[in-house]
């Protein structure tokens, strides 16, 4: 089957390694953010009559961008054997990932408020892809088991 919207298969393993790396960095981003490694001067502002440099910490930006990018690469890379059934599993997993994600989001609308809800929304940027990846691989494992059981 010709699927031209998927990334090549070879990219999946390195993308998964980088995804895990950046998820780990994201879990410890508060420690990294205080290290001044990714603080860049973006201008100056007037404070008490003198110009003071203004800095922006790009740690969260780089980590968030990388997690989304590598999640996309993992989720939408071709399988070694890409056929109609794998495409069906992919579509089925994607639809269920959206259902699960937005059902959880509807519930969380009533549970979290203010800045807590902002955290929920930030996490929600990643969850549809992660749920899709998990469901897709669970379905692939079930397919492999059923094929091995038939032999």
Image: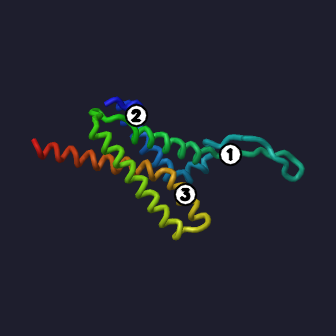
- Residue count near mark 3 (Cα–Cα under 10 Å), binned few <14, some 14–19, many ≥20: some
Q: In front here: 130 or 40? A: 130
* Mark before the other along the chain sequence, 2 or 1: 2
- Residue count near mark 1 (Cα–Cα under 10 Å), binned few <14, some 14–19, many ≥20: few
User: Which residue carries the number 3 mark?
Assistant: 121
- Circles 1 and 3, Cβ within 8 Å, touching? The answer is no
Q: In front here: 44 or 113? A: 113
Q: Residue at x 45, y 49 (%)?
A: 24
User: Real-space Cα distance between discs 2 and 1?
Assistant: 35 Å
For residue 144, which quarter of the picture?
top left
Q: Position of residue 54 (x, y in %)?
A: 75, 46
Q: Residue at x 49, y 47 (%)?
A: 25
Quadrant of the frame with the C terminus: top left
User: Which residue carries the number 1 mark?
Assistant: 56
User: Real-space Cα distance between discs 3 and 2?
Assistant: 27 Å
69 up-or-down from 119: above or below: above
9 up-or-down from 47: above or below: above
Q: Position of residue 4 (x, y in %)?
A: 40, 30
- Residue count near mark 2 (Cα–Cα under 10 Å), binned few <14, some 14–19, many ≥20: some
Q: Nearer the viewer, mark 2 or mark 1?
A: 2
* Mark before the other along the chain sequence, 3 or 2: 2
User: Which residue carries the number 2 mark?
Assistant: 6
Disc on res. 145: none
Q: Nearer the viewer, mark 1 or mark 3?
A: 3
Q: In front here: 71 or 106? A: 106
For residue 117, which quarter of the picture?
bottom right
């Amino acid at each position: 089957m010709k699927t031209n919207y998927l990334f090549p298969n070879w990219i999946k393993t390195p993308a998964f390694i980088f995804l895990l790396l950046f998820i780990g960095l994201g879990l410890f981003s508060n420690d990294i953010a205080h290290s001044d490694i990714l603080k860049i001067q973006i201008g100056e502002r007037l404070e008490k009559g003198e110009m003071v440099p203004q800095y922006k910490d790009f740690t969260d930006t780089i980590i968030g961008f990388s997690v989304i990018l590598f999640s996309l690469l993992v989720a939408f890379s071709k399988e070694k054997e890409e056929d109609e059934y794998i495409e069906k599993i992919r579509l089925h997993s994607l639809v269920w990932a959206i259902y699960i994600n937005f059902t959880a989001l509807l519930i969380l609308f009533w549970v979290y408020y203010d800045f807590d809800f902002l955290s929920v929304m930030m996490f929600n940027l990643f969850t549809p892809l992660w749920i899709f990846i998990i469901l897709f691989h669970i379905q692939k494992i079930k397919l492999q088991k059923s094929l091995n059981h038939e032999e």
